[in-house]
Image (cartoon, rainbow, N blue to C red):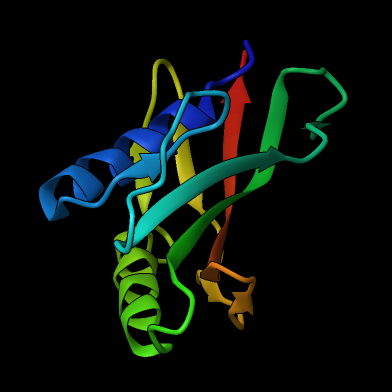
Amino acid sequence: MIPDISAVLSARLGQWADSQGIPVAWDNVAFEPPSGAPYLAAHDMPATPRTLDLSLTCRTFPGVYQINVVVPAGSGRSSAGALARQIAALFPEGQELAGDGFTCWVSGPPAIFAGVTTDTTYTVPVSLNYRADIVS
C-alpha cells in the first residue's frame, strides 16, 4: 500500500482555506490567480520510502508539504507573514491526520521561510515535514 498522504494534507488545508475565503492553487489543476488578493499554492514533495525491518513489513513514507503564501508585490510583508503563521498553526508538530488505512504525522515544527519577490508577487513558503508508517 502506498498512502495518499498528499490528499490528507490537502484536505486539511483546503477546509481551512475555504473557511477563510482564500483560493488555493493545487498541483495540475487549472487556476487563475485572483487580482490583488492573496492565494495559496500547495505542493507535496515525497521522499524515498524506507523499509524499517528485516521482515519487510514496516515501511515509512516521509516527505515535505509546502504551502506558498502569495500576495501582491509591494503590499508589504505583514499580511503574508500573518497567513504563514496561521498555516503553520494548522499543522503543529505531532499533528495526526487519518487517511484511508494509514495515519500521517507532522514530524517537526513547520518552517516559515523568507519571502521571495517577483515583479508581481511576494511569496512566503511554509514547509512541514511529514511521515506515515505502514505495517503490512
Q: Position of residue 91 (x, y in %)?
A: 38, 59
Which residue is pictured at 31% across the width and 69% down the height? Answer: 89
Nearest the camera: 111 or 57? 111
At which x and y percent is residue 77? 43, 88
* Residue 87 horizontal/vertical position (percent): 35, 64
Q: Quadrant of the N terminus?
A: top right
- 105 relative to 10, above or below: below
Question: Considering depth in this image, is 83 or 127 the residue closer to the camera?
Answer: 83
Q: Quadrant of residue 62?
A: top right
Residue depicted at x 51% and y 59%:
68
Q: Is residue 124 above or below residue 12?
A: below
Q: Residue at x 45, y 63 (%)?
A: 70
Q: Quadrant of residue 88?
A: bottom left
Which residue does the image show at 33% across and 46% down from the upper left?
Answer: 13
110 and 101: which is toward the camera: 110
**Is 39 displayed left or right of 28 in the figure?**
left
